[in-house]
Every structure is written in C-alpha cells, then in structure tokens.
Image: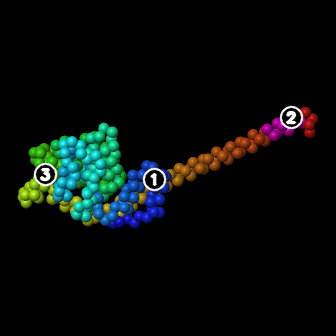
Amino acid sequence: MTLKKNKDWSDDLAMLEALLPSSKQNLRRISAMMEGGECPKIAAFGKYNHGKSTLLNALVGKEVFKVADKRETTEVSEFNHDSVIWIDTPGLDADVQGVDDKRAMTAALESADILCLVHNVKAGELDRSEMQLYRKLMKQDRNYSGKMMLVLSQIDQVTPENLEDVENEIRRQLPDLQIFSVSSLRYTRGIQEGKDGFIKASGMKEFLEFLEELKNNIGDTRRREGLRLVRKARVELKEMINHRNADLESAVVNLEKHEKDFWSDFDVARKKIMKRTEDLGLV
C-alpha cells in the first residue's frame, strides 16, 4: 500500500506537529507510511550485543550489517533485499549519552512496519529497561501484536531446559506477543552446507513463515495503523480546540467583568466629582 502524499499533506502534517507536539511521533509515522513505497520495512530492535545484526544477515543471506563484540551499529542502517527493506538499529544501553537509543526508538516508532524485538536468550528474562522501551512501543498502537514480535536469539548456546525456562518467563512478561526462538548461526550454516537438520534446529522456518504472512498483509496493516493514528490526532486536536474554546470563553467572561467593573467605578467617580462640584458651588 502506498499512501498518496503531496505538498499539501506535507504542509498539513508540519502544521499539526506544531499544534500537537505530543502526537509528533505518530504524525511522523503517518508521513513515513506515505513515503514508504510498496516494500515493507522490517526492523531489528533491542539491546547491544543481543544478535540483531546477525539475525538480519541470516535473513538477508549475506553479511550486510556489521557484526562484532564491540559496538558497531551506531546509526540506523537499511538494506533492500527480496522486496523488503531491512533495518538495523543501534543497540540499546550501549551509549551513555543516549543518542543511539533515541535513533533506535525513532526508527522503531516512525520507520518500521514490522518490528522484531531481539533478546539474547542467555540474558534470561527481559530487564527493566527493555520492558519500559517495549511498553512504550506497544503504547503507540493498540494492535501492536499485529506488527511486532519477540525474537529470542542464540538458542544454540543454552540447553533446551534453560530455553524453556526463559521462554516461559518472557511469556509471563509479554503475554500478548508472539515469541520465536532462533539460532541465526545454525540457520546460516544449514543454508551454506545444505543441511536441513541445522535449518530445522534453528527455529527460523516458523519465524520466516510468520514474517511472510505479515509482509503479505502489509497494506491492510498500514491502512489500519494509519486510521488509528489519524483518529488519535483528531481526538487530541478536538481536545485542544475544546481547551482553547474554554480559555476563550473564560477570557470573554473576565473581559465582560472588567468592563462592568470599569463602568461601575467610572460611575462612582463621576458621582463623586459631581457632588464635589456642587459643594463648591461650581454648578
């Protein structure tokens, strides 16, 4: 789905951003959908060193995104492959200034049609910072489960028992999200060596099928999301108009009161002056 955008729309959205600062992120998401073209945008989002870039490289089929033990991804990176724009976001909690986190959140909230929340299974349950960020993302769209999923990465580095424990705990933390447990390394090796056993053990087949379903429905997903965001903006705009009208009515009442008080004081002063002039025999 391509939402038509023209200069008038751009001007309208810019004006609305100025009027509704709390809806700025939602309005920019609408703008991004208008400019997005037909290709769905799928982003990997999560903490530093949790396997986002490795996952995307496995999905693309070649090493496009930088992978290293040190912090490599500090900018939002995009790669067009197989009619999908894949987006790698900076790792969260790696930059003490918080600049990377802001870039990642902007990409997640404004650019992504589909969002893969990536969490290293070795880290156990989601920590407080992850939960806060994920809840912020979910708050943007009540139908978040239709465009967002949690991907547990590096399952090849834990026992099946540990994996099950982590899966159960995270399902308790995020009961509404679809969860996939994958091994990018097993999948890549299976593809390269033609070994179906590694591909099956990677858990990627189910994940890819889910992504494919989301991709096929991206037009409807964007349309529903756009309508919800427009409704939110309308509600906030109506509330702002109501507040302005209430302020205006209050200002009019105050003005009328001041005018009434002025003429009352004026009349009192006039009577005092008239009496004084009479007392002095001037009239």
- SS for callout 2: helix
Residue occupying image coordinates x 16% and y 43%: 122
Residue occupying image coordinates x 39% and y 55%: 28
**Nearest to the observer: residue 42 or residue 217:** 42
- SS for callout 1: helix
In the rendered image, the vertical position of residue 227 relative to residue 104, given as above or below: below
Q: Position of residue 235 (x, y in %)?
A: 45, 55
Viewer-nearest of discs 2 and 3: 3
Q: Residue 276's mark?
A: 2
- Residue 270 counted in the magenta span: yes
Amino acid type at image mark 2: Arg
Amino acid type at image mark 3: Leu
**Magenta part of the protein: which range?**
269-278
Amino acid type at image mark 1: Glu
Task: Kindly report the distance in space between the C-alpha atoms of the residues bearing marks 1 and 2.
Answer: 61 Å
**Nearest to the observer: residue 175 or residue 105:** 105
Check contact, mark 2 vs mark 3: CB within 8 A.
Answer: no
- SS for callout 3: helix
Task: Kindly report the distance in space between the C-alpha atoms of the residues bearing marks 2 and 3.
Answer: 102 Å
